[in-house]
Image (cartoon, rainbow, N blue to C red):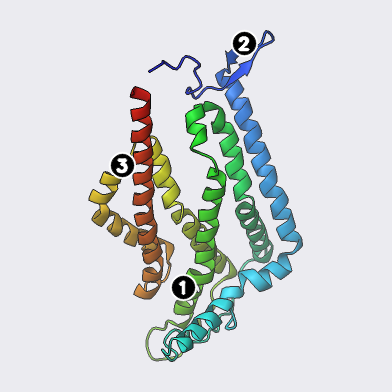
Amino acid sequence: MAEDTTGRGSFFKRIRGQEGEEEEMSFIDHLEALRWHIVRSVLAVFVAAILFFIFIDTIFDKVIMGPTRNDFVSYTGLCRLSHFLHMGNSLCMPPMNMQLQVNSVSGTFMSSITIAFVGGLIVAFPYLCWEVWRFVKPALKPTELKHTRGIIFWVSFFFFIGACFGYFILAPFTFNFLSNYTIGTSNILVYRPTLADYLDTLIDIILGAGIAFELPMASWLLSKIGLITPGFLRSYRKYAYVALLFIAAVITPSPDWGSQTVVVLPLVLLYEISILISARVAKAQAKRDKEEWS
């Protein structure tokens, strides 16, 4: 097998000199390149945040407060599904009566800023992945580049699927359970959470679910660099399930088993998909090694 003398596998990028020869970039050059990648990423999030802030009233009424409305699409959809399956009202959730309060002078404004920047971060996520990819790409070998086509699409796809799962499924279960949970038989307790607390919970659910759904991509990457194998994932499956239960408990603020089950089942499915992905990566690597040594 021919030795790689081009140095393309090195993490250090290479640039062309005046005579057409490739020269290795210095550490300072890498810092400069990284700085511009970070600047462009921050600008993308900032521009998206400005657009969110312009339409903050509509976004707050329709999107942010959506899971607290009794006519939210998830509530009506689950109830219709329950009737369609002849299960009565078993999937219909009780009505909510959630009123939020602001207990600081700048609370409303700071909440608007939080909504705008988190929304900008979510919308700009594919671009952020693209900037990371542009920084890492020159360090990859041609064979590695061949097997990483569409990586930005798949990373973004799993993130948005997870974010939608958190918003449309997990958030309604969580807020409905918490708003209807009571202690004791008297009516001396008044349920009125703060707007900041509500936003923190909603953001944790959406971003947590989005990151958790990156499990297949993490499996693909770790299998590519040889840190995990399909045999390793299979042998530690029972420990992984326990870890997924813990992750589900962290993502879901509500302590009921119903909400945590709704979270852990997709995570278990994603783990099994990760095993299949790791097996395909290992098979492709074995085939490639066989061709190189033949």
Q: What residue sits right under mark 3 in the picture?
A: 229
Amino acid carrying label 2: it is Glu
**102 up-or-down from 271: above or below:** below
Marks 2 and 3, the one that precedes in the sequence: 2
Secondary structure state at the residue bearing disc 2: loop
Residue 235 position, x and y percent, is: 23, 49
- Specify few, some or many for label 3: CA neighbours under 10 Å numbering under 14, 14-19, or 20 or more: some
Circles 2 and 1 in contact, beta carbons < 8 Å: no
In this view, which residue lies farthest toward the front?
294
Tell me if I can see residue 102 in this picture: no
Task: Tell me residue 92's x, y (percent).
Answer: 47, 86
Which of the two discs, 1 and 3, labels the residue nearer the N terminus? Answer: 1
Q: Nearer the viewer, residue 114 or 143?
A: 143
Label 3: state its secondary structure.
Answer: loop
* Residue type for callout 1: Thr
When asked about the image quadrant of residue 195, the answer is bottom right
Element marked by disc 1: helix
Tell me the kind of residue under disc 3.
Thr
- x, y percentage for residue 294? 33, 23
Q: Residues within 10 Å of mark 1 (few under 14, many from 20)?
A: many
The circle on residue 21 is 2
Residue shown at the point (55%, 44%) measured from the top left: 150
The N terminus lies in which quarter of the figure? top left
Instruction: Confirm or deny contact between disc 1 and disc 3 (CB under 8 A).
Output: no
